[in-house]
Amino acid sequence: MIETKELKNRRKRLMDMIGSDSIAILPTSSVVVRNRDVEFPFRPDSDFFYLTGYPEPEAVLVLIPDREEGECILFCRESDEKLETWHGRRSGLDGAVNIYAADDAFPIEDMDDILPGLIEGHDRIFYNMGSDQNFDQRVLGWVNQIRGKVRAGIIAPDEFISLNHFLHEMRLYKSRYEIKLMRQAAKISAKAHRRAMQNCQPGMYEYQLEGELISEFIKNGARYTAYPPIVGSGPNACILHYTNNSDEIADGDLLLIDSGAEYQCYASDITRTFPVNGKFSKAQREIYNLVLSAQTAALNEIKPGNHWNDPHDAAVRVLTEGMVELGILKGNPEDLIKNKDYAKYYMHRTGHWLGMDVHDVGDYKLDGEWRMLEAGMVMTVEPGLYLSANSEGLSEQWRNIGVRIEDDVLVTKDGYDILSKDAPKTIDEIEELMANAA
Ligand code: GLY
Ligand code: MN
Ligand code: MN
């Protein structure tokens, strides 16, 4: 569990930014029903969890800078022996204070009675409208209740401000503790990718390899995936968000696996592509090595001071020039880049921020310009080529080759560190691992 010192520090930094005269209200996620009487596993809201470390549902964090009786208040579930016998342990109000370092804790059932009194006297409410309509209505109800009392000299807030700007800027720069968890998430996922490569056989079904991945995650303490695994063979490797994972894996095809574990609420996001029978064909080899060169070129652009888009530009250049050399695209690479002709086969961007959310928070542009990379940011680098059989004019030899290579990368003060480096990546590494598994 996170040290309370780090939690308190995060709250303090946020409160310094929002200033006194303000109150911040952050509910955790709602429990979602999967089918009658059965709920989806609960996952706390990332912003809420970042500030509280509190893993249980039905909780709301309230931050009130400069409140003398305590700045950090948690509304949460009380201990309840009977309910805990049925549904599991609760940390209760004492736990909220003693484990999660809240200054004060109140029962969640009492929030309607207590929270309006806490909001009173503040000019601004920092609250993210729009993600939970029911909660939005409650917040508006509390404010209207206070506005009804302004003639009695009570100050009612007249400004709603999103917390995103301040909080997401904080979340973009990972602490040592966060990097440790992200390294572990990537390590577990890399192990799972190795296991999938070792277990893959023509004639298996895609979901059977999904089973190998998930088993490895859980065995290593990562109960949940950061996103649904993509296990796509042959033509399915060319469907970017393929998650059916239902087809038989055919000899001679490539298999694309995009799968990452979530470890203690931190995501990993790794893609590897390998030949089902353990040996790349000549055409598969050409495309694979081209994507790998594009990834290397992108990685070489990762250092403090370079811009967010530099790795993407480098990958696009290598992919476009390579496709011209292989005869997949015709024309001058400069023009093909300018006109975005490469996007017929490379239609997504080269990466995204990674953190508690797989597509993590943080602005990519500041004042209209791509932002600079800085030490402590974590991003993916994931170029690909998707040569679908439906592509007009594509020669037979390239059809149904879909390749993506995706790693999780920490920006360091001198360059970068690949968190997912344990997943085999070169053709030799992959073929050797698969040959030795047979
Ligand atoms: N797995 C989601 C992504 O690569 O962005
Ligand atoms: Mn990704
Ligand atoms: Mn991915």
Image (spheres, rainbow, N blue to C red):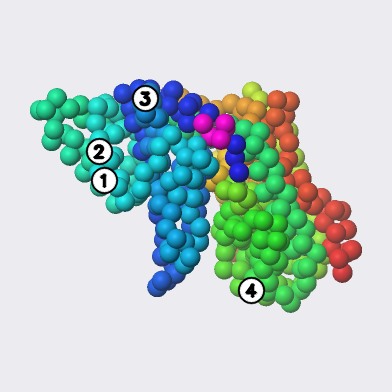
State the mark number for residue 68: 3
Q: Nearer the viewer, residue 285 or 321?
A: 285
Badge 4 is on which residue?
247
Picture residue at 13% right of the left edge, 35% below the top? 148
Residue behind label 2 places its C-beta within 8 angstroms of ligand 1: no
Task: Classify residue 98 as left or right of residue 327.
Answer: left
Picture residue at 54% right of the left edge, 46% below the top? 357
Helix, strand or loop at mark 4: loop
State the mark number for residue 116: 2
Badge 1 is on which residue?
112
Q: Nearer the viewer, residue 282 or 154?
A: 154
- Cα distance between the residues tagged 1 and 2: 7 Å
Task: Classify residue 107 as left or right of residue 417.
Answer: left
- Cα distance between the residues tagged 1 and 3: 22 Å
Helix, strand or loop at mark 1: helix
Q: Residue 307: give x, y in percent of width and height.
A: 60, 28
- Disc 1 and disc 2 in contact, CB within 8 angstroms: yes
Picture residue at 81% right of the left edge, 50% below the top? 426
Of labels 4 and 1, earlier in sequence is 1
